[in-house]
Amino acid sequence: MSIKVIVTDIEGTTSSLSFVKDILFPYARAHLAAYVRAHAQTKHVRAELTAVNEIVGRTLTLDESIAQLIRWLDADKKITPLKTLQGYIWEQGFRQRQFLGHIYEDAAQALKKWHALGIKLYVYSSGSVYAQKLLYGHTAYGDLTPLFSGYFDTHIGAKVDAMSYRHIAETAHAAPKEILFLSDITAELDAAALAGMHTYWLVRDAAKPPGSGKHRTVREFSEIELA
C-alpha cells in the first residue's frame, strides 16, 4: 500500500482509556455546572446551549440544560455540544497544569517519524477539535500539534458511518486507498474500511491477540507497517 495520509483516533489508540475516563471525564463533570453558569452569556457557551435545546426539541432552563448535559456525560454520549463544552472545561485544567495530555511514547515517536517522512497526519475523535488540540498541545513530549495537518470531530459525521471517512478523504485531498486509519474500535475500523481506507486495530492491553479479526492488529505504533 502507498500511504500518504494517516488518520488516528485518540482514546485507546494514541492515549490511554484511563486518562480520559479517570482524569478528563471526572474533571469535566466536577466543573461543568459551575463553568456553564459562569459563562452562560458568552457567545461560545450560548451557542452550545442552543444546540442542546435543538437536540431535545424544546427550550430548557439553564438548570435543565446543565442536568441534561450531565446525564449525557454520565451515559458517555457522543453529543456534539457536550463534547464542545468538555473541551472548554478541560482547557482550564491544561492551562492550570492540573494534568498533561497522556500520549503513549510509541505513538509520539511514530507520529514524529511519519511527519518527518512527509506523511500527512490527521486526528479523528468524538472529542471536539478544540479538546483534541488541547490534549496534543500539552503532553510530556511537548506540543505535538505542529505534527498534524488537521483535526476532525463529530461535526464531520459519526465515527461508525463510512460517509464520514469519505468526507475526511475529500478534505485531506487523498484517495481513500492512500489513507490509513488507526483505532481501537472495530466498528470505526469497519466504517473506514467500507470507505476504502486501510486500517490497523490497536489492541494495546486488550485480551484479543494481534492477528485475529478482519483488521490488522498491533499492540503499539512501532508494529505498524506502511509498506
Image: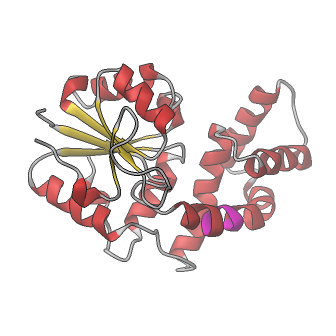
- Please identify the dominant SS of the magenta region: helix
Image point 74% across, 50% down: which residue? 73
Q: Where is residue 185 in the image (x, y as percent from the top left)?
A: 49, 41
- Asked if one can make out residue 111 in the rendered structure from this viewpoint, the answer is no
Image point 26% across, 37% down: which residue? 180
With respect to residue 22, does 164 lie above or below?
Answer: above
With respect to residue 224, does 173 lie above or below?
Answer: above
Image point 26% across, 32% down: which residue? 172
Q: Where is residue 227 in the image (x, y as percent from the top left)?
A: 10, 41
Q: What stretch is highlighted in magenta?
A: 23-27
Q: Where is residue 131 in the image (x, y as percent from the top left)?
A: 51, 55
Say whether residue 124 is magenta: no
Q: Does residue 123 appear to the left or right of 180 in the view shown?
A: right
Q: Does residue 38 appear to the left or right of 67 in the view shown?
A: left
The quarter of the picture where residue 181 lies is top left
The residue nearer to you, when weighing 181 against 224, is 224
With respect to residue 178, does 212 lie above or below?
Answer: below
Tally of numbered tags: 0
